[in-house]
Amino acid sequence: MTHTLLDELRWRGLLYQHTEGVTAALQRGLVTGYAGFDPTAPSLHVGNLIPIMALVHLQQSGHRPIALVGGGTGLIGDPSGKASERALLSVEEVNENVRGIRAQLERFIDFDAAGSAAAAMLVDNGEWLRTLRTIEFMRDVGKHFTVNVMMQKEAVKARLESGISYTEFSYMLLQAYDFLELHRRHGVTLQVGGSDQWGNITAGIELIRRVEGAEAHAVTFPLVTTASGAKFGKSEAGAVWLDPERTSPYKFYQFWLNVDDRDVGRYLRYFTLLPREEIEALDQATADRPERREAQQALARLMTERVHGNTALRAAIEVSGFLFGGLEPAALSRAALEVLSAEAPFVEVKESEVSDAQGAGLDVLKLLVAAGLAASNGAARRLLEQGGVSVNKRKLSAQERVLDPVSVLLEGGYVVLGKGRRDYAVVRVIR
């Protein structure tokens, strides 16, 4: 069982480099390995999915994963991959971010495997770093590192010209000390991370060897870019977050659905647990029938369900079907209508505010103005007379100014107004 871990990572393209002896260590029995997560925000983003999936594969191979959140190092910031020094966070901000990250990790790794030695752990390095005494650290840890060697590490070399503070220069020592403390407290002998972390990881391996006389190992994975060379995990709106308040499940779904044909096979290997045969079948489908986007649909479904759950996935599929397909508004669930309200212009109004003067029904002109699709009743009237208004995707005639609320209001009191072919707005009428 254990000998297949590196093979699994290798065929999925997740294996970049590893220390000698790691295969033998994995074969000898249960290995406890960790990946670090920087709590600079209250949410992880899709760029964090590679180390998360490394822990998933570790656990599935019968080993124990530890997710280390940097409640201590997060107060400083890792210089790896950064062109400039980041703003420092307060202790309260870091603590809040750590709480948010655990909930997201639980979607991927099992913290509650009762009685299992492979049950995951969440550990905060603030436990030992925030109480660390400077003199003791310099004496017991700093003496094992030479400045010459530290300056050759990739993360440091990349910043020497633009300038690097002593705070960030010392990050390598702190990460190495994390590895040592995790080894002492939880028997950790493996660290996984991005290829840009190799220098920091091997520093920890060396520290464990010198201080404890013990063997430890590293496995790194490649940094992910798109086929066009862009940094993975960015959309037009910025980073794609796992927190639905930062990136809605619909936008999350669309991010994966819009993946380039050249990337989708890699991403299925990186981010899902689909077996090799199914992924290769989807590769073939992309080659034979690219217009169907079967691989992208599978990727979007799997990722959205894993991160946001089945209800959010169904809602995202429905909204996509409404906006880009032939799905009628009447077929939208309450959850989908709520999602659509977050994606399109949305307003809530009292029924009395949009009723006609006689109280016979809903006044289309008032609805258009309330929704922001028309600046005034006069502009709304002209739009209606020109045949440019639809309600729930049904085009209205010039005479249909008053609508029966029973027939047009969808579940929850929603109605979808259209202006022309492309502009939509959602109104919720409250009685």
Image (spheres, rainbow, N blue to C red):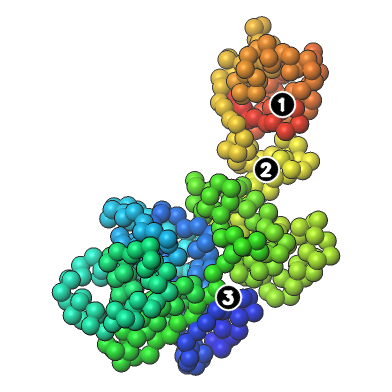
Residue depicted at x 59% and y 48%: 236
Earlier in the chain: of badge 1 and badge 3, it is 3
Q: Quickly name the residue at label 1.
A: 419
**Which residue reaches farthest right?**
288
Circle number at residue 123:
none
> The disc labelled 2 sits on which kind of residue?
Val
Q: Quickly name the residue at label 3.
A: 14
Q: CA distance from mark 3 to mark 2?
A: 33 Å
Element carrying mark 1: strand
Residue 421 image offset from top left, x and y in percent? 76, 31
Q: CA distance from mark 1 to mark 3?
A: 47 Å
Earlier in the chain: of badge 3 and badge 2, it is 3
Residue 120 image offset from top left, x and y in percent? 44, 72
**Which residue reaches farthest top?**
358
Circle number at residue 319:
2
Residue 185, by quadrant, is: bottom left
